[in-house]
Image: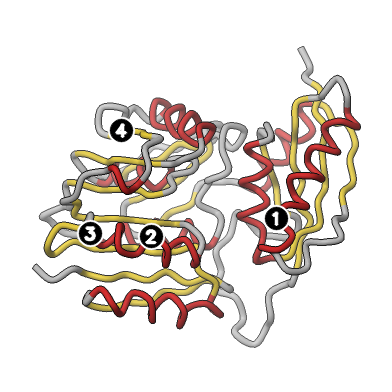
Amino acid sequence: MKKAWLELDVHVPSAGIDLVCNELAELGCEGVTVEERELDTFVVPDPDESPPESYWIKAYFPQAEDQADLEETVRDRLTWLGPLVPGLLPLTIESHPVQNEDWAEGWKQHFSAVRIGKRLIIKPTWEALTPVADEVVVNIDPGMAFGTGTHGTTRLCLEALADLYETPPHPCQVLDVGTGSGILAIAAAVLGAKRVLACDIEEESCRTATENAKLNGVLGQVEITGESLETLENGFDIVVANILAEENIRLGAELTTRLAPGGTLILSGILQEKEALVTSAFAAFNLIGPVVSREAEWICLQYRKEG
């Protein structure tokens, strides 16, 4: 049976892609692609080439009975983001119906297995791949979630996690703040974490992360919670937060408090232009670092708490 979908095409400044995708997910979007991004390759960009200032996002919603009502709801929600995403307004939105196989096949053209570090592989559910030696696999169905490891911030976090699990002893306790699809929590679990606590204040994100953890057989290791960071316990060997720069700063004290002595803090979702803003804020916590990694316009910061 063919399933009908409504495709909404939204023109978005590059710095606002994550925020817009999150809002679309809350409104019931079940899949998204970003036009002109080479999602199946990770070649370091030419340092002399400036990244595009904006992209077309294609968001897929189950066909609504009232298409105009859905479009108005999306427009209202994204208009609310205007002050947070310079250049988003005035909104440019186009829409048209599509059939299930149209966008499903589109995903398959843009998402294939990605190897990160020496052992970690992120792959779509439809792609057959047999790991060898000590390789570990995270299976992701992009129809279920937005986190596929293709976005620069997610990849930077995955690379940081993979590196921390290169040599024993492996970190045992991991906290994933703002888990989204759960991809970072699942990666930590398959890499060797004994317990991963993944938190997100969005109910839909918790549901999606739970589905993905179940898909990967790690529900015994990964606990998904909708509780706020302030209510969670301390003593984690790794705390990873792939959220906006401003949110990293706002939650700085809570993030560092939850680190065990000798633990590693991984921060991303940070545009390069906001690096100094974040590092200045975290200088107050007397951490060791940061080690900075970069991809396109994004950075990842790693700190260590003194043991």
Q: Which one is earlier in the sequence, the residue at label 1 or at label 4?
A: 1
Residue 302 image point, x, y percent: 32, 70
Kindly report the distance in space between the C-alpha atoms of the residues bearing marks 2 and 3: 10 Å
Which numbered disc, 2 or 3, marks the residue that appears first in the sequence? 2
Cα distance in 3D space between marks 3 and 1 = 30 Å
Q: In this rendering, would 116 be left or right of 33?
A: left
Which amino acid, mark 2? Leu
Mark in the foreground, 3 or 4: 3
- Say above or below: 247 vs 126: below
Give the mark nearest the N terminus, 3 or 1.
1
Contact flag, marks 2 and 4 (Cβ < 8 Å): no
Give the Cα distance between marks 1 and 4: 31 Å
Seen in the image, is 115 located left or right of residue 141? left
Residue 82 to residue 210: above or below: below
Quadrant location of the N terminus in the rendered image? top right
- Amino acid carrying label 1: it is Leu
In the picture, the disc for residue 223 is: 4
Real-space Cα distance between discs 2 and 4?
21 Å
Q: Which residue is mark 2?
A: 251
Q: Nearer the viewer, residue 295 or 130?
A: 295
Image point (25%, 33%), residue name:
221
Number of residues whose C-alpha sits closer than 10 Å to that of mark 1, classed few (under 14), some (14–19) or many (20 or more): some
Q: Identity of the amino acid at label 3? A: Thr
Q: In the picture provided, is 192 more to the left or to the right than 160?
A: left
